[in-house]
Each structure stands twice: as C-alpha cells, then as structure tokens.
Amino acid sequence: MNIKFQKALFMLDKGQFEKAEILLQESFEESKSDYEKIQITACYAELLFETERFDQAYEKAVYILENTDEYENDCERETAKNIIKKIDLERKNGSN
C-alpha cells in the first residue's frame, strides 16, 4: 500500500474528507498496481457516496465491477455492489 493511500485512510478516519480525496486521487495516479488501484477506487467510491456525490460514486463502483472478476477483490466488489444497489434504490424512491 502506498504512503499516500495510507495517509488518505488516516485523513478519512479524522473526518478530513477534502484532504483525503486529494490523496486518493494522487495515490491512484501514482499506483502501478492494478490491485491497489481497485482498493483505492473502492475507498474513493465510499467517500463519494458518503458525501452524496452519487453519480461519481456510481461511476467508480461500475469501474470496479468492470475491472475485476468474481474471483478477485471480493471486498471491493462487494463495496461496489452495495453502492450501486443503494444508489439505484435511492433513484427509484426519488422518482416516485
């Protein structure tokens, strides 16, 4: 795990979302590991969801599902599925 990703997680724990978001973006750009990029994206998708940026969170979740298969990144895939499910439900309920 790269240092910026670790710092981003620390910032999230402290509730410093703006700093965490910058670090997540930088750590994704600097990462050379596909596995790590998926981990970062899952974390970023959760941040976007929690800050009610649903369209962006949805995009990140779809990215995760499109770039992994059912045998890898179980935790990240589950996070992505949950985000999509919650957003789809919110959209459905919001349209009534």
Image (cartoon, helix red, strand yellow):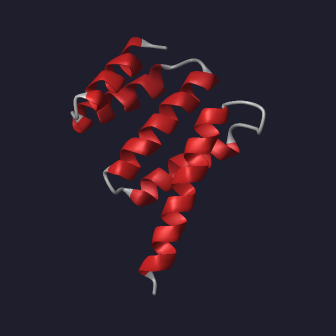
Q: Where is residue 22 in the image (x, y as percent from the top left)?
A: 30, 32
Q: Residue at x 39, y 32 (%)?
A: 25
Q: Which residue is drawn at 51% across and 77% down?
A: 92
The relative height of residue 27 versus residue 22 in the rendered view (above or below) is above
In the picture provided, is 85 more to the left or to the right than 5?
Answer: right
In the picture provided, is 16 more to the left or to the right than 36?
Answer: left
In the picture provided, is 24 more to the left or to the right than 34?
Answer: left
Q: Position of residue 18 (x, y in %)?
A: 23, 37
Q: Where is residue 14 in the image (x, y as percent from the top left)?
A: 22, 28
Viewer-nearest residue: 26 or 21: 21
Q: Position of residue 78 (x, y in %)?
A: 61, 43
Q: Which residue is drawn at 47% across and 73% down?
A: 91
The relative height of residue 85 versus residue 71 in the rendered view (above or below) is below
Question: Quadrant of the image for the C terminus?
Answer: bottom left
Identify the image quadrant of residue 33: top right
Viewer-nearest residue: 31 or 10: 10
| Picture mark count | 0
Identify the image quadrant of residue 65: top right
Q: Which residue is drawn at 67% across and 34% down?
A: 74
Identify the image quadrant of residue 63: top right
